[in-house]
Structures are given as structure tokens and as C-alpha cells.
Amino acid sequence: MRLLNSFAVAAALLGADVHAEVAKLPLPKSCSGVPNMRYQYTINSAWTVMKIAGSLKQVRTIIWDTEGNMLVQQNTRGVSVHTFGADGCINSTNMLISGGGLNHGLDLTPDGQTLYASSETTLYSWAYDPLTRKVSNQKTVVKGMSTGVHSSRAVKVVPGQPNLVLLQVGSNSNLDMASQQPSTGRACIKIFDSDKVPSGGYSYNTQGEMFGYGLRNEIGFVPDPNGVFWGVENSGDDFTRTENGQRRDIHTNNPAEKLNNLGDPRTVRNAWYGYPTCFSVWDPSSFTNGLKTGQHFVLAPNSSYNDKAIAPRLTFQAHSAPIWNTFDDEAKNMYVTFHGSWNRQPPTGFKVVQVPFTRLEDGSYDPAAPADSRTGYTDIFSATNPGSCTANGLTMSNCFRLTAASWDPAGRGLFVGSDNSAEGEIYILSPKS
């Protein structure tokens, strides 16, 4: 796999206008002052892993500026900026933005001059200078996002039309029935025009345009080289299904986590993906009506039900908890971080997986595996024994809790974060060839 060493080429793939080149850096074997890997792990034989940063707080998102500096969203601590020396190790770390309840969402415009970051309720923007690594002119872009069980907010700038900003809000409970109405502003992704921000910011629930809804908690989504966004969805917990008067516990292996083709936000509006009505099968043995992996089901079948929801393009093991996804340079593979389960025995997740993609005759990108596959992805980095990982709350565990995923423009590999509350860590996963 050839890794790019310039934002110029990578941005061209995504239709962005970035010209600053980033010097290639060596992959270090270790870095002075960085603690050892805190948790036991297994690495695919075709890959290597090293720890590039530790002693952080709950790493959630990693992005890069046009100078190759690394910006990290640390949950509730704020946004830090890290520079690198000629040896490939971090040689300076500073807090770019402190506090403010910032917890997950982080992105830059393609020209590297506008930074977005989000708290549970509010999306902010700043003017950003990658040379001085300073921000100024803080503005409120969107306000009034609902609070609830899912507090993380993902934000993405549309590369081919960077005045458009995608902003996600999850459901406010496991089964948020009210969210089937788009007006609630939950379980959805909306689009906001940064060129037309009203005084005081947009109201999330009543303004902006609806990109997609029926998305229970789509906290990771990225564009392919054509500008089509692909999102990973955390599905429901502790479900039972009532069929022919019989109630069955299906929660161990159902519903599946999803990989959704969300479409191009420059053209798609009001797409519905099913939640809280439709869920996707992972293990067909839990059902008696011949459903296949990836197909939709409802918790209480009835004769009036008519499935009009967009089905996922691929699914993942139930309760894996996908957090972020990213493509490699030519979109031959997608990489997804699995945070790990809290309500399944034995536990699952706690890994990074590789999803092979292919380019179709019409030029579009698509997973290589069929929609009903349960083998459409491969583990490349995981806890040594995910089945023994504990999950006491969202970030406490005896294993890493994998979150951020971002390819390094300087060519060292895939940077992956962990938000375990004991220590926030960043690793580099690098293919051997």
C-alpha cells in the first residue's frame, strides 16, 4: 500500500483545494518519554504497531492541519496540537482550546483555516493559523443540540463544497421513539451552510437541512474520493423480539452494527435509515422467517409494516460499537475502530478492522463483500482476548477503548486513539509493505 506524503494529492482525491505539502517522516520504533503500551494487544502479521503518545485524556478524534501538525480532541479537556521532529516522534504539545465541554467532533476546512469543534449542545468555529498553531475569533455555528444518553457529536466539512458542514446528533435513549420525527433533531445528521450563519448561530432542531435520519448513533462518517459519505452506526442494546406471541431475547448477537452509504451531501436530503423502527440482522439463527444478515427486522412484526428504510451496505458484529472510520489513500480499504461492548457476554469489539473496498465500473466505491456477509472485514489490531475485556461505563476497562482513526499525511501509518479513562493513548498502525 502506497501512503501519501502530501495533502495536495490526498485532497485532490476528495475534491478539496489544499496545496501545502507535508514532509515525509520516518516511522519511529519508540519515542523517548512515551510510556509503554498500557494494554495487551494482538497485531496482524502484515502490520506493526507502536505507541506515539500517552498520558492524554480520552482521545476521541485526530485530524491534521496543512503543515502536518496533529490536532487531537480530548474529551472535556479540549483540543491539543502536536508537532513532530525529524525522528517522527512528537516534539511539542500544547493545548489549542481548553475546556468548553468539547467532547468528540473536530474538523478543519480543506484550506486549513477554519476549525470546528463540538460540545454536546454546541458547534463552534475558530480561525486557525497552522503556522503559529493558534486560534482566534471563536463563533457559535450551531446551538441547541439535544442532550441524552448519546452525548458525542460528529462534525465533518464537505470537501467538495466546504461551506457545508455535517453535524450529527444521536438518540437520547436506547429506543428513542420520538426521533422517528425529524423535527426532534435526534438520531440524524443535518447540513448547515457556514456562509449563512445567523447571529448567535443556527438552532439545530429548527434550522439547517436534513441529510439523513433514522441513524441511532452515527458518530463516525467520512467521504470517499467521489464525495459520498460512509457512516458507522451504533445500534440498539438489550433487545427482545416478539413473534407469533412469543418473546425472545435476541440481544447477544443482534441487532448488527451498520456501515451505511449516506450518499453525497451536495445532493441527498431526507434519507431515512430505519431507526427506531428497523434494525439489521447479524445472526439469522435468532429469527424464524428466513431473514439474512444485513436485512431489516422489527421488534414486533405486524401485517401493516412496510420497510421503506435504506438498508446498510454492510454490517458488523452486534455490540462492537464502531466509533470512527477512515479510508486509505486510494479508498481500497476502510478502517473502523471498535470501542467494545458493555452489554454482551462474552464481550466483543476492542479492535481495528479493515474493510476492503472496490471501485465499480461506474466509478463509484463499494465494499467488496456482499451485503449479507459476516466476513466482510478483517481484524488488524485488537485486545489480546476481547472476550475478557471489562467495560465498566463508557471508558473504563482493562483493555483499550479504540476511538480515533486517521491516516498520517507524513506517511507513517494509521493513527488510532484510545479513550480509556486510565490513560488516553495514540498508536501508529503501519503496514509492512
Image (cartoon, rainbow, N blue to C red):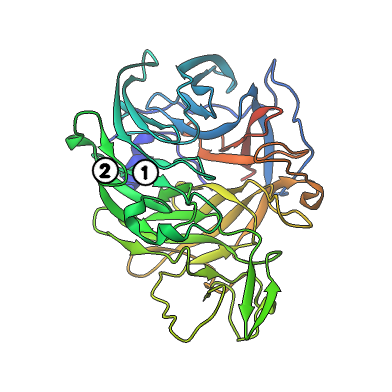
Q: Percent position (x, y) of residue 23?
A: 45, 26
Q: Give me the C-alpha separation between circle 2 and circle 1.
A: 8 Å
Amino acid at the residue labelled 2: Phe
Residue 192, label in figure: 2
Q: Percent position (x, y) of residue 282?
A: 62, 69
Q: Percent position (x, y) of residue 413?
A: 56, 38
Determine which quarter of the picture holds residue 249. Answer: bottom right
Asked whether 110 or 317 is in front, the reply is 317
Q: Is residue 354 left or right of residue 154?
A: right
Disc nearer the start of the sequence (2/1): 1
Residue 154, label in figure: none
Determine which quarter of the picture holds residue 37. Answer: top right
Residue 107 vertical position relative to residue 238 in the rendered view, above or below: above
Residue 167, label in figure: 1
The local secondary structure at tag 2 comes to: strand
Does the CB distance between marks 2 and 1 fall below 8 Å? Answer: yes
Residue 86 vertical position relative to residue 311 in the rendered view, above or below: above
The local secondary structure at tag 1 comes to: strand
Q: Residues within 10 Å of mark 1 (few under 14, many from 20)?
A: many
Residue 43 vertical position relative to residue 424 in the rendered view, above or below: below
Determine which quarter of the picture holds residue 112. Answer: top left
Q: Percent position (x, y) of residue 111?
A: 29, 31
Amino acid at the residue labelled 1: Leu
Q: Is residue 413 left or right of residue 122?
A: right
Confirm whether residue 411 shows in the render.
no
Asked whether 109 or 235 is in front, the reply is 235
Confirm whether residue 62 shows in the render.
yes
Asked whether 394 or 86 is in front, the reply is 394
Q: Is residue 95 left or right of residue 133?
A: right
Residue at image coords 44%, 80%: 305
